[in-house]
Image: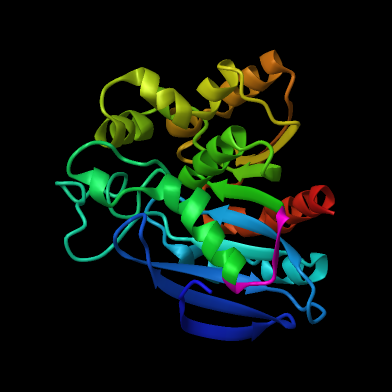
Amino acid sequence: MAMIETVSTNRSHGGVQGVYKHASAATGTEMTFSVYVPPHDEGATLPVVWFLSGLSCTHANVTEKGEFRAACAELGLILVAPDTSPRGEGVPDDAAGAYDFGLGAGFYVDAIETPFAANYRMWSYVTEELPALVAANFPVDMTRQSIMGHSMGGHGALTIGLRHPDRFKAVSALAPIVAPSQVPWGVKALPGYLGDDRATWRSHDAVALIEDGARLPAILVDQGDADQFLVEQLRPELLKAACDAAAIDLTLRMQPGYDHSYYFISTFMADHLRWHAQRLA
């Protein structure tokens, strides 16, 4: 069994919320992640939802503020929350210490640019290493996986889901970055990690992936209309146009008065988990 170290466990809604760490081969660093396992019969395996967090976050943000455990306990869902970037001594960061690149802002890509290529391999970590680790240590049914995320993590969930349509039975996002090639956050991060060739960026851009032929049966997105990043960084209308052109069933719900915070996320978390549970049954 792959080796993990237990940082903490707490009883919650009849299940166990755990935080764990391990030495990552993908990032060359220690990585921390959380797993909520709901109450279940001994020997049973359960579907798993992967939750990818946004800029400046760790595993702890959704674990402590996401308000997902009651719904996971009711629906019988395991929820896994990885970190958003490698961390530790010697891991390169943005030279100016900005929040939107470097530590806490891995953008779920495998970097190829120096000095980030050695550690910033979040695509491999989230799609390969961590799933294998979770499968070896928790009662998951790996034939029933889904993925969701917020902001930068919504970008990760959409791109991972679009590139692995046979793995994930449901894909959803809360206030996602849908077209990083066309917004300031992405136009900063993608060349920093992947270089200046915009063709390379397309495999990490949900709108571009759809334009290039990637398909999902359905996507659920919630977006607050009072989100301070809506107009400049998130631009859900671009995802709607791409999905309309590709005949993808996108449910885009604009939520009046909601911002980008965990008050918004926690409000609609249970809705998303129920939507996932229907497709994971």
**Residue at (51%, 21%) from the top-left corner?**
208
Q: Pick out the residue farthest to the top.
A: 245
What percent of the width, then of the height, locates residue 76?
A: 79, 67
Residue at image point 69% right, 38% down: 166
- Residue 234 x/y as whole percent: 49, 33
Q: Quadrant of the C terminus?
A: bottom right
In which quadrant of the rendered view does residue 262 lie?
bottom right
Image vertical order of residue 48 relative to residue 150, above or below? below
- Residue nearest the viewer, comparing 92 with 53: 92
Residue 260 picture location, percent across and down: 51, 48
Residue 182 on image: x %, y %? 41, 22
Question: Which residue appears farthest toward the front when viewing the image?
Answer: 1
Left or right placement of residue 253 versus residue 110 in this view: right
The residue stretch that appears in magenta: 137-143
For the question of whether residue 216 can be seen, the reply is yes
Residue 14 as seen in the image, left or right of residue 234: right
| Residue 138 falls within the magenta-colored stretch | yes
Residue 62 appears anywhere in the view: no
In this view, the residue in front, 55 or 198, is 198
What residue is at 66 percent from the left and 57 percent from the top? 49
Q: Name the side, left or right, on which 87 lies relative to 143.
A: left
140 to the left or right of 262: right
Q: Is residue 181 magenta?
A: no
Vertical side of 138 occupied by 203: above or below: above
Numbered marks: total: 0
